[in-house]
Image (tube, coloured by chain):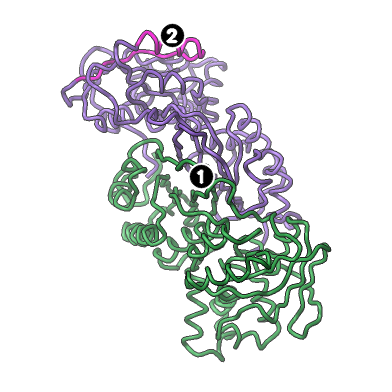
Chain colours: A purple, B green
Amino acid sequence: MVPGYDAAMTEDDLIARCFAPIAGPDALGLRDDAALTRIPEGHELVVTKDALVGGVHFFNEDPPASIARKALRVNVSDLAAKGADPHGFLLALALPRGTAETFVIDFAHALGADAQQFGIPLLGGDTVSTPGPLMVSITALGRVPTGRMVPRTGVQPGDRIYVSGTIGDAALGLQVRLDPSFGQKLSSTQLDHLLSRYLEPQPRLALAHAMRSFAHGGMDVSDGLVGDLSKMLRASGVGATIRLADVPLSDAATAMAVDEKAFVTAMTGGDDYELLAAVPPAQAAAFEAAASAAGIAVTLIGEASATRDIVMQGRKGEPQAFSTQSFSHF
Amino acid sequence: MVPGYDAAMTEDDLIARCFAPIAGPDALGLRDDAALTRIPEGHELVVTKDALVGGVHFFNEDPPASIARKALRVNVSDLAAKGADPHGFLLALALPRGTAETFVIDFAHALGADAQQFGIPLLGGDTVSTPGPLMVSITALGRVPTGRMVPRTGVQPGDRIYVSGTIGDAALGLQVRLDPSFGQKLSSTQLDHLLSRYLEPQPRLALAHAMRSFAHGGMDVSDGLVGDLSKMLRASGVGATIRLADVPLSDAATAMAVDEKAFVTAMTGGDDYELLAAVPPAQAAAFEAAASAAGIAVTLIGEASATRDIVMQGRKGEPQAFSTQSFSHF
């Protein structure tokens, strides 16, 4: 027997009290060895898994509700990028010894609310104790009509490259959080915007249908726009000209990006959880209309080309190189 | 950027060099946001997830190959208990900073060999760094013909209760490992048997077909026979009489269980990864024959009853109570 993190709570208690109430019907009450679920005929299963570690992917002092939301949403973002509808998720939660029961209750409550919001029921998982920091690993299951997943490798020459929402907020929010002096010229509304974008991503699930209807290729921006977009283009064997001046920035990011270093952070910093979509010109109007109907802004930032050259045009129109293209957790 | 655990290795390198070679075709080369897989018509998806933490579920000094095998096998064991055929798995790996590349190579190599042995291809996952201990979380996907999953809740009065293999070896192996004086009367072969059963479980996947063909209810024994069997009976709303004298023990466990405390450890200690099956009397002969054909020993240890009383008959035939019925990681 390993020393408990809360003598009053067994693992079974914790599951029964915190997680069973938020579980979906396929979870079998979280009382079996596994969950049982059915993928509708004519559909394929899309699966993704992301792990978040305290002190690496979030701050140990972040509210449990925010940690829960981030952990689920980064996975939902992957499903959205693939054009998949959420089907369910599994949770592995490693709790530091001494974690208070209220922490777990708040975590589970927020997770349950998010699961409802995004229509992705909890199917099962595992809760363990750890001598290390909190770790949350979520496996998300989605479904797409057969043959309709949007791959990273599908970009074709001539495709228009779109990005959703605004880029750079989360990376700048992290920077401000680490060193508040970076944000001294911002209004409190602007500061809140950046900080909250880092703390709680907004997955663009409402774009999933438009993605699978109109995009040749897509991915979500988790490790920085420049690096992730380059990865997608290379995986597709195409090049592109990207106009960084056209990359959508929030008011707050625009204010900070007056400084070129902050602009580079915005373009390469990561944690955006916006979507990149490569859409053939003939479908561009339909894609834009579908995004608009879904309430998600999408912005044209460039075009794919048959050459394998990836040209990032800086804000002055000249090719811009980046020493670090994307965020790496290593 | 978080300080790397090996300056020479980026996450992409690590995936390309260590994990892409062991990935299945549905993993899309581990280069997309998600894996894409198809569940054959007429089948349901069985999903399970287990997390293992260094210093809790394994020793930090255990060989990486053993940690990899244990992490995969405890999940395969869950699939087997549900009568499911393996379909694929996702891996979340949190590596302590400073982990040597050779560690990851050995881990991945063993994982790949096990994945082949059990027919469960790697579909995807996530690799992150952690300031804490090594953590491995695996989500395993299996498939069963629709309606054929073996639930924990399916035990019926009159069902015969079988257990596979031998019970208690892993718990006694852990005890010997923590305090070698416990094993001083054992031969080196016996010691090796106990230690290896703790280090590397042997999931009874070969029984999966017999489970779904003949068992009303089933689960795997991961947290101790007495506690897990009691859970299954309670979940099914039945009682049982269980003859602990009939619980199969290895030579090594038999030698240790001369001591009553060691016997209690064997019955309640956990990490067995054997299967419990509740089989109706009319199917018992067929179940035994199928197990025999699969090369897995199964032993009758009791019968389920319509009363809700769970009677564990000790080795002298008297009802035996246990102060701790099963292992808890909390």
Quadrant (top left/top right/bottom left/bottom right) for the N terminus of chain B: top left
The residue singled out by tag 2 in the image is A289
Looking at numbered disc 2 in the image, what kind of residue is underneath it?
Ala
- Residue at 50% in and 31% down: A76
Whether A95 is among the magenta residues is no
Q: Is residue A278 above or below residue B328?
A: above
**In front: label 2 or label 1:** 1
Residue B99 appears at what percent x and percent y? 38, 57
* Chain ID, mark 2: A
Query: Under tag 2, what secondary structure?
Result: helix
The residue singled out by tag 1 in the image is B43
Query: Under tag 1, what secondary structure?
Result: strand
Circle 1 crowding by C-alpha within 10 Å: few under 14, some 14–19, many from 20: some
Q: Nearer the viewer, residue B156 or B243?
A: B156
Q: What is the total number of numbered labels drawn onto the structure image?
A: 2
Q: Nearer the viewer, residue A159 or A133?
A: A159
Looking at numbered disc 1 in the image, what kind of residue is underneath it?
His
Residue A47 appears at what percent x and percent y? 45, 39
- Residue at 72% in and 48% down: A16
Q: Nearer the viewer, residue B226 or B132?
A: B226
Q: Distance between the Cα atoms at labels 2 and 1?
A: 38 Å
Q: Which residues are magenta?
A: A284-305
Residue A233 appears at what percent x and percent y? 26, 28
Circle 2 crowding by C-alpha within 10 Å: few under 14, some 14–19, many from 20: some
